[in-house]
Amino acid sequence: MTVTYRQYRQPGVVLTDRRFQVPLDHGDPAGERIELFARECVAASRQDARLPWLVYLQGGPGFGAHRFAGAQAWLGRALRDYRVLLLDQRGTGASAPANRQTLPLRGGPREQADYLRHFRADAIVRDCEAIRREVTGGAPWTVLGQSFGGFCAVHYLSAAPEGLDAALITGGLPTLDGHADDVYRAAYPRMERKSLAHYARYPGDVERARRIAEYAAEHEPVLNGGYRLTAEAFQSLGILLGTGDGSHRLHYLLEDAFVRTSAGPALSDAFQEQVQALLSYAAHPLYAVLHEACYAQGGRPTAWSAERVRAEFPRFDAAKSLAGGEPVLFTGEAVQRWMFDCDPALRPLRETAELLAARTDWAPLYDAERLAANEVPAAAAVYHDDLYVDTADSLRTARAIRGLRTWVTDEYEHDGLRVSGPRVLDRLLGLVRGEI
C-alpha cells in the first residue's frame, strides 16, 4: 500500500512525499512489514506531463536521500527529462530508521543483528522493485546510484534488470567477488598516498598532525559531544581526503586545533566541535554497523577486516610513527572495532556489530553470468584516484558488465556528483543514449 500525502512546492519544483509498506524479508512476503519513505520531485512546468522515472540511491550505507531546496545540483538536470524519486533506503532517513534509539525495540543484540541482515543492497533493490510497480505502473525506470548506491545499481543489473530502463553509476562500481580483506589491502596504499599528497601540499601539517596525535594519545580527551578522541580516531579524519576540497578543509581544521589555557595547551572548543561532527556516526550509524557487510559473500565472515588488514601496514601505527619521528598517516573509509568504544552513538551497538562481523551466511550479491549478458544501457563515472572505491576494481567490474560505458576522470574526487552534478549526469546520460 502507498500513502501519498502533502504535496508542496519549492522554487521550480513540485514535491510529493510518499510512504510505502514493504516486507522486512522479501523471502517472506506474508511476514513483518516496514515503512519506506520517498520524495517525488517534478519540475513545476511539467507537473502534469507523462515523464519517465529516475530513482536515486544515495551513497553510504546509512545515509538518507539528499534533501534538496528546489532544483539544486544534479536534480535540476534530472528534472529536465525525468520525474525523480529520492528514496530513503531502508534503515535511513525516514525509512524505518535503525539506530541506537530504535534498534532496542527489536530486542537484544542477537535480534538486532538478525534484523539488520535484511538491510543490504539485495533487500534495497527488492524494495525498489516493490515500489516501482506502484510508482510507474510497471514501467521500467532509470536508477542513479552514487557510491554505495552504485553497488545497489550493479546488484539491480544482476537481480532485476527487467526493472531498469538504464543504470547510471557515479563512484560506485564494486568488486564483484573480492572479500573485504581484498578491498582494504587495496585501500590502505591509497590512504597513504592521499596522506602524503596532503603533506606535500601543506608541509606544516606534518608537525601539526603529530602534535594533535601526541595530545590525543596522552590525554584521550572526551570531546564536547561525548566522543573519545584517541590517536587512531584522529587519524580517521583522513576521510576528508576523499573529497574535492577535503585536503583544504583538513588543513584549516589542523591549523587552529590548540588554544592556550591556564592549564596549558588544550584542544579548542571550535576544533572539538568540528571533529565531533566529522567523526560521529550519530546521524548515520548503519555506515559503521553494515559497512563491511556491503562486501560480504561467499561464506566468509568480514571479522573486522579493516582493523585486521591495517596490521599489515605498520606505517599506519600512530604510536610507531610518533616514536620514530615519522608523519602520522591518515585513514578513511575504514570502520574499525574501536569506533564502537569511542563514539557514544555506536557504543550500544557494539555487540550487534560483533555478531554481524561474525556472520557467514550472507547471500551472493552479484551474478557474473547475468552481468556478462547485460542488455540494460549503463554508464559509470569512475574517479581516477578514488579514496573510497578502488579504481582498478571498478574498471574490472566495468569490463565484466556487457555494454557498460565508463567515463574515467581525474577532474573530481568521489564527490563529483555533489560538486558538479549537472555535468556528471549530463555525461552519463550522453553515454547511455549513445550521444557520446
Image (tube, rainbow, N blue to C red):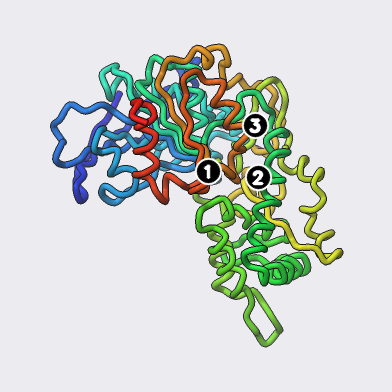
**Residue at the limit of the structure toward the bottom, as seen here:** 262
Q: If you read the primary sequence from the N terminus, does the residue marked by circle 3 or circle 1 appear first?
A: 1
Which disc, if any, is residue 335? 2
The quarter of the image holding the N terminus is top left
Frontmost of labels 2 and 1 is 2
Residue at mark 2 to residue at mark 3: CA–CA distance:
21 Å
Label 2 residue SS:
loop
Q: If you read the primary sequence from the N terminus, does the residue marked by circle 2 or circle 1 appear first?
A: 1
The quarter of the image holding the C terminus is top left
Judged left or right of residue 272, residue 49 is left
Q: If you read the primary sequence from the N terminus, does the residue marked by circle 2 or circle 3 appear first?
A: 3
Residue closer to the observer: 372 or 208: 372
Judged left or right of residue 367, residue 86 is left
Determine contact: label 3, label 1, CB under 8 Å.
no
Residue at mark 3 to residue at mark 1: CA–CA distance:
15 Å
Residue drawn at x 54%, y 67% as measured from the top left = 273
Determine contact: label 2, label 1, CB under 8 Å.
no
Mark 3 Cα shell of 10 Å, populated few (<14), some (14-19), many (≥20): some
Which disc, if any, is residue 99? 1
Judged left or right of residue 276, residue 186 is right
Image position of 302 with respect to 243: above or below: above
Image position of 237 with respect to 430: above or below: below
Residue type at numbered disc 3: Arg
Frontmost of labels 2 and 3 is 2
Frontmost of labels 3 and 1 is 1
Read off the residue under disc 3.
110
Residue type at numbered disc 2: Val
Image position of 204 with respect to 123: above or below: below
Residue at mark 2 to residue at mark 1: CA–CA distance:
16 Å
Q: Is residue 90 visible?
A: no
Residue 150: image x %, image y %? 49, 32
